[in-house]
Amino acid sequence: MAPVSARAADLPPGITAGRNGPPGRPKPPRHLADLGLPERRVAVTELGERPFRADQLSRQYFARLADDPAEMTDIPQSSRPGLAAALLPRLLTAERELACDDGATRKTLWRTFDGAYVESVLMRYPGRVTMCVSSQAGCGMACPFCATGQAGLTRNLSTAEIVEQVVSGARALARGQVPGGAGRVSNVVFMGMGEPLANYRSVVQAVRRLTEPAPAGLGISARGVTVSTVGLVPAIGRLAAEGLPVTLAVSLHAPDDEARDELVPVNRRWKVAEVLDAAWRYADVTGRRVSIEYALIRDVNDQAWRADLLGGLLAGHLVHVNLIPLNPTPGSRWTASRPAAQDEFVARLEAHGVPVTVRDTRGREIDGACGQLAAGAGPGGGAGPGGRPSGAELPLV
Ligand code: SAH
């Protein structure tokens, strides 16, 4: 099917839609997480194995979270190397791991098979664990306040490269490597590097792998999954029709086209009214409350009149506003709102009857908070304005 998410011709200059890497460069190796269970059975048959080996291998990967063929004792020893080589290639190598909040927040810098860098962040809260994952290496959307947007797009991640970020967090939790005892991933947010809807096919497949029960997938509730977008209108429509009850988050950041054209350049293609229409259709079709992301930037989008304008646009809809105090990024001329302006913004939205929360700034000191992921700089990159991030470096296991 032709990708309708964001055709290059549709987009304003300076914005890059999804791309699968420079032409002629090898694709990420095939991994079982790229395939549905029936396709995995075909793949193992082609290796001369019985189809049920696919189920065993899948259970090892998704349920036991094994990463060493030697642990896969239900599979004959002679079959393990061939199966692992064909369906469990190493896709991501942890290059660096930083932690803060006494280990409850940890950011991992991953190197891909072709030397691209992406980051994921695990955040443990009382009663839930959220993995924030990347969907692209870099990002082509060019939002000026976001560190990822500054370096541009390297390439789309494959389905398995996305899934592997979550599986690796699940593995660390299951093995008790995250303080707080053994645990599970309850939530996945596509709020790391990249524009998920510009890599539509891989992202939707990754959602399927994450939510299908074992052995097909990881068995996370779809209600615990959030896909965040700058507002690629055709792709929002397509996502609504997938029958996946994931939460849609729209990075709005301004209620008026004048400010949004600057803050989220893709707004020059799809205006605030069109983006919100698509969001309301999404809520209608899925019954899910849409989340509106709004980074509060001092004197740029935090004025009381903008809060009123936003409140007026959202009132009466199935919606929730997430205000994000602007996180610092290198070279940015912008800063977070004054506390009084933030309080006033919240109060005005509430006066319109719009539910609103202010997002915590988890991971800020390790440059793992919203808009701070900038792995394009490679290992040691992504340092905040103060130089290197200040969190504790974890030994890589
Ligand atoms: N491209 C998608 C996914 C990224 S989600 C999207 O834009 O929705 C990351 C969220 O953090 C987005 O809402 C983004 O606009 C926001 N963000 C980016 N830079 C930020 C910053 N410096 N401070 C706070 N939020 C930021």
Image: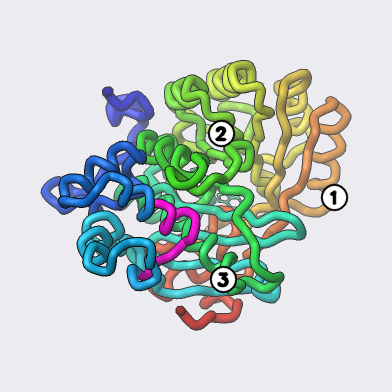
Q: Residues within 10 Å of mark 3 (few under 14, many from 20)?
A: few
Q: Residue at x 46, y 36 (%)?
A: 265
In the image, 108: left or right of 14? right
Give the CA distance from mark 3 to mark 1.
Answer: 44 Å
Q: Amino acid at mark 1?
A: Ala
Q: Quadrant of the N terminus?
A: top left
Q: Residue at x 27, y 64 (%)?
A: 80
Instruction: From this view, report whether residue 349 is shown above or below residue 312.
Output: below
Residue 201: name its quadrant: top left
- The percent position of residue 42, horizontal first and vertical second, equals 23, 40
Mark 3 lies on a secondary structure that is loop
Instruction: From this view, report whether residue 333 is shown above or below residue 190.
Output: below
Mark 2 or 3 closer to N-term?
3
- Mark on residue 260? 2
Instruction: From this view, report whether residue 149 is shown above or below residue 277.
Output: below
Q: Residue furthest left?
A: 24
Q: Which residue is mark 3?
A: 175
Query: What is the span of residues highlighted in magenta in the rendered image?
Result: 58-68
Q: Residues within 10 Å of mark 1 (few under 14, many from 20)?
A: few
- Mark on residue 340? 1
- The percent position of residue 164, horizontal first and vertical second, equals 42, 56
Q: Residue at x 53, y 29 (%)?
A: 244
The residue lying toward the viewer, choosing from 311 and 292, is 292
Mark 1 lies on a secondary structure that is helix
